[in-house]
Image: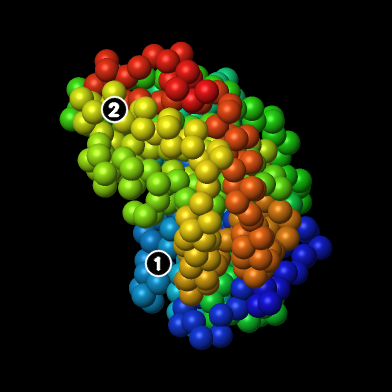
């Protein structure tokens, strides 16, 4: 195994996934905090903090942060999810120390000035507006709000324009102080990287990082429900989801293969039955979305509103059938696709950094690709059918955006699934 992990006295973990043949290096910090850890009055602060980390430090201006990596041909980026926030730079191996220095500078010495904060509010409000213009994004926010009502995890990652416009500076700085500490962060190196050298870089550059513990979280509880929003657009965007296994559940791999089998490729059941044989949609897919303590099995379709009456019965029929009629050939194909995705991902430096960062935050340890592959290959026909029954016998969560007047009512859809 190429992964090594060292825990510093502060509790900060440093992990590397060495790829001897790689021509690049990823250095980044993965922080175990996201939308579900925000105060009730500050939805969107996790994402706002991510933006503010690029707005200047005591040593570097916002422009200097943008150019420090790029002038050597590298790239820098970040992202926020409901459970994690990550900051990373991809550089040539000789610039690994520079990348580590820039990431450390951002996470420990960022200055949240009123001027930059006000400027970034407008940027994020425009980002929120852009997402509202993208119905395929908006409908997923609607889904999570319906699946997790009155829960932090169900709120949109970007927050609302109203909240962002008024969020005080101390809400931003206070969030960083509570969550950006050694006990809630891992430093990742992937690609052409020496573990001992990265440990020394981190030891020198992350001295100011305070001690701390991961946040305590309210338990996520997914429930059924129906959320439809009428909008004058050409397509109707529909998601039908169900409470499903969490990332830590023993049947998670069966659920993942069920997603591949139902809607993970152009040879999947839903793609073939819904698009290829009936022409009901341009896009249809399915997959398992996992959190630490909950999951959602999601089926998305974008369709002509006039075809929705035909589309829903076809989807429901397939969900009923897969509970008892998984064929050996389609399971074999799903396993082959999952195996190829896993092994091809091993060639990607950025993906290996992402996987390692997520594993250390979620599972507290690295899990070798060979172990994951073994678990996937061990899944049987009975396992997939059993997890399908477990998932599809629960009440669905339905979100629909567009011309929604021809969608059946929730009770009728429930009847189709029985």
Q: Where is residue 287 in the image (x, y as percent from the top left)?
A: 48, 45
- SS for callout 2: helix
Q: How dense is the environment of label 2, judged by Cα within 10 Å: few (below 14), some, or many (20 and up)?
A: few
Q: Where is residue 103 in the image (x, y as percent from the top left)?
A: 54, 62
Q: Earlier in the sequence, mark 2 or mark 1?
A: 1
Q: Can residue 215 be seen in this view?
A: yes
Instruction: Judge by depth and name the residue closer to the eye, 91 or 122.
Output: 91
In the orientation shown, which residue stands out farthest toward the right?
A: 9
Query: Which residue is at 59% across, 70% downward?
Result: 189
Q: How many marks?
A: 2
Query: Which residue is at 64% across, 30% downward?
Result: 220
Q: Where is residue 307 in the image (x, y as percent from the top left)?
A: 23, 28
Query: Which residue is at 63% across, 54% downward?
Result: 380
Q: In the rendered view, tell whether residue 114 sits above or below residue 109.
A: above
Quadrant placement of the N terminus: bottom right
Instruction: Judge by depth and name the residue closer to the eye, 125 or 32.
Output: 32
Q: Could you say which disc has been placed on residue 310 in the image? A: 2
Q: In the rendered view, tell whether residue 233 sits above or below residue 103.
A: above
- SS for callout 1: strand
Instruction: Judge by depth and name the residue closer to the eye, 322 or 34.
Output: 322
In the orientation shown, which residue stands out farthest toward the bottom?
A: 21
Q: In the rendered view, tell whether residue 208 sits above or below residue 114.
A: below
Instruction: Judge by depth and name the residue closer to the eye, 120 or 319.
Output: 319
Q: Could you say which disc has been placed on residue 214 in the image? A: none
Label 2 vs label 1: CA separation? Answer: 46 Å
| Protein image colouring | rainbow
Query: Which residue is at 62% across, 63% downward?
Result: 377
Front tag of 2 and 1: 2
Residue 101 left/right relative to 161: right
Give yes or no for contact between labels 2 and 1 (Cβ–Cβ under 8 Å). Answer: no
What residue sits right under mark 1 in the picture?
75
């Amino acid at each position: 195994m190429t992964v090594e992990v060292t825990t510093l006295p502060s509790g900060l973990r440093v992990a590397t996934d060495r790829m001897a043949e790689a021509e690049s290096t990823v250095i980044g910090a993965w922080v175990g905090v996201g939308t579900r850890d925000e105060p009730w009055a500050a939805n969107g602060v996790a994402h706002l903090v991510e933006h503010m980390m690029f707005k200047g430090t005591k040593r570097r201006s916002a422009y200097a942060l943008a150019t420090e990596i790029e002038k050597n041909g590298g790239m820098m980026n970040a992202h926020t999810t409901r459970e994690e926030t990550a900051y990373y730079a991809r550089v040539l191996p000789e610039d690994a120390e520079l990348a580590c220095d820039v990431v450390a500078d951002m996470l420990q010495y960022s200055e949240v000035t009123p001027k930059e904060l006000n400027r970034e509010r407008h940027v994020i409000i425009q980002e929120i507006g852009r997402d509202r213009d993208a119905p395929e994004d908006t409908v997923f926010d609607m889904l999570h709000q319906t699946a997790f009502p009155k829960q932090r995890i169900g709120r949109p990652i970007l927050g609302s324009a109203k909240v962002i416009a008024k969020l005080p500076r101390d809400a931003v700085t206070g969030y960083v102080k509570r969550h950006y500490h050694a006990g809630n962060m891992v430093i990742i190196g992937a690609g052409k990287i020496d573990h001992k050298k990265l440990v020394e870089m981190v030891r020198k550059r992350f001295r100011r990082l305070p001690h701390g513990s991961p946040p305590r979280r309210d338990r996520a509880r997914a429930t059924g429900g129906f959320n439809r929003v009428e909008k004058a657009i050409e397509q109707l965007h529909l998601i039908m989801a169900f409470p499903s296994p969490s990332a830590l559940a023993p049947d998670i791999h069966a659920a993942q293969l069920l997603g591949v089998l139902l809607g993970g490729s152009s040879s999947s059941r839903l793609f073939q039955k819904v698009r290829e044989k009936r022409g009901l949609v341009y896009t249809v897919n399915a997959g398992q979305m996992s959190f630490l303590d909950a999951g959602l099995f999601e089926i998305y379709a974008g369709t002509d509103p006039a075809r929705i009456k035909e589309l829903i019965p076809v989807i429901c029929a397939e969900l009923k059938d897969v509970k008892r009629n998984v064929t050996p050939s389609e399971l074999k194909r799903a396993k082959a696709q999952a195996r190829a995705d896993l092994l091809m991902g091993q060639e990607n430096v950025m993906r290996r950094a992402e996987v390692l960062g997520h594993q250390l935050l979620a599972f507290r340890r690295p899990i070798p690709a060979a172990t994951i592959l073994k678990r996937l290959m061990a899944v049987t026909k009975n396992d997939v059918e059993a997890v399908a029954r477990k998932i599809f016998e629960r009440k669905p969560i339905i979100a629909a955006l567009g011309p929604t007047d021809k969608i059946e009512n929730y009770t009728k859809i429930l009847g189709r699934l029985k």
